[in-house]
Image (cartoon, helix red, strand yellow):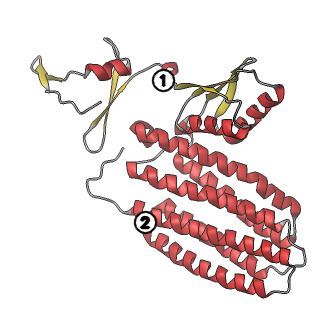
Amino acid sequence: MKEEKRKIQLTGGSTFTISLPIKWAREAGVKQGDELSFVQRSDNSLVLTPLRDKEERLKHAELVLSEKESFEGNFRYLIAHYLVGYDVVKLLSPGGFEAEERKRIKDEVRKRLIGMEVVGESSKEIVLKSFLKYEDFTLHDAIQSMSEIIMSMLEDAISALEKGDQNRAKDVIERDNEIDRFYLLIVRQLKAAISDPELAKKIEVSRQRDSLGYRIIVKNMERMGDHVESIARNSMMMSPAVGIKSIKEIGTRTENLFTKTLASLSNMNIVKANEAIRDANKLSEEVEEINGRILAEQWRATDKIHALSIMESLGRIARYCEDIAEVTINMGITVAGEPEF
């Protein structure tokens, strides 16, 4: 609705009153006798929200699965509904669900969408409901869990490369699914926080611009997970006899860079973030030098290809650390009088 102005009235000599725009009231479903919640923000503006029963506050959606789309294509539509905050999603299949398709949907929902569970089903529908309570798992908790998984994956990927451990490399590949789950959860949280100041406070997001910053950060972390997975896959295809001392050294330094970057983010320490950027630039330069040495080695062509792919992934992870550190600096600068949620 367009901006409207209302004059404050004095009622009974001690109470200020103001009328509500009828268009807003109708769209919000507000009627006589309903209660409204007022939340004062740091800039003295008020957020007005109609109070609803818990079930009434749930956001419902129906998603008709297209027979022209692949399974992944349809599942992307479901992910989009999850990200924008729908609490209940009813999946509809005009031709009915085959047993195998039904099982795959349930498996993928449990594997990829944190908090979503199947609560009802029939021959032509599957009902999903989110049981996630944002306040029980803050944004910082989610980022911490995500970062710990990435760090352990990176350590194991380098170890698998050094020892030629195929099983450890496979385990790293499987753990990338956990990174994707946390990424989707955090995006859902951030989208919800933008329109709900009280929720923003509960998940510990204090300013609107921080939502964008964290969105960029977790996307970079999700891409890191993809590159760690790539390192593990390439390590499985390299000859055991190939010397990888220099690759291991860069891998260890990448781990240290990631640790420093996360520490600067956790404390909003712009000095440490600047140090991380310098370290990332230096590491990227050394990756290029080692690439030249790999090309000069007397290795099989396939081993060189996989080694260079690993080095490329380590270089990309360094660049993602640089991006996170830059966002940390931007978020670490305060603005006098800046409104908070």
What is the spatial separation of the Cα atoms under label 1 and label 2, in whole angstroms?
A: 37 Å
The residue sitting at 52% across, 37% down in the picture is 84
Please name the residue that numbered disc 1 is placed on: 57
What amino acid type should be assigned to the residue bearing mark 1?
Arg
What amino acid type should be assigned to the residue bearing mark 2?
Ile
Q: Split into 4 quadrants, where in the image is the N terminus?
A: top left
> Are dots 1 and 2 in contact, CB under 8 Å?
no
Q: Earlier in the sequence, mark 1 or mark 2?
A: 1
The residue sitting at 57% across, 81% down in the picture is 282
Disc marking residue 329: 2
* Residue 252 in view, yes or no: yes
> Residue 99 sits in which quadrant?
top right
* Residue 202 in view, yes or no: no
**10 above or below 260?**
above
| Residue 308 as seen in the image, left or right of residue 160 | left
Badge 2: how crowded within 10 Å, few (<14), some, or many (20+)? Answer: some
Disc marking residue 249: none
Residue 217 placement (x, y as % from top left): 53, 57
Query: In this view of the protein, which residue sits in the foreground, 233 or 244?
Result: 233
The residue sitting at 70% across, 23% down in the picture is 93
Provide the secondary structure element on which disc 1 rests: helix
The residue sitting at 9% across, 20% down in the picture is 13
Q: How many marks?
A: 2
| Residue 279 as seen in the image, left or right of residue 299 | left
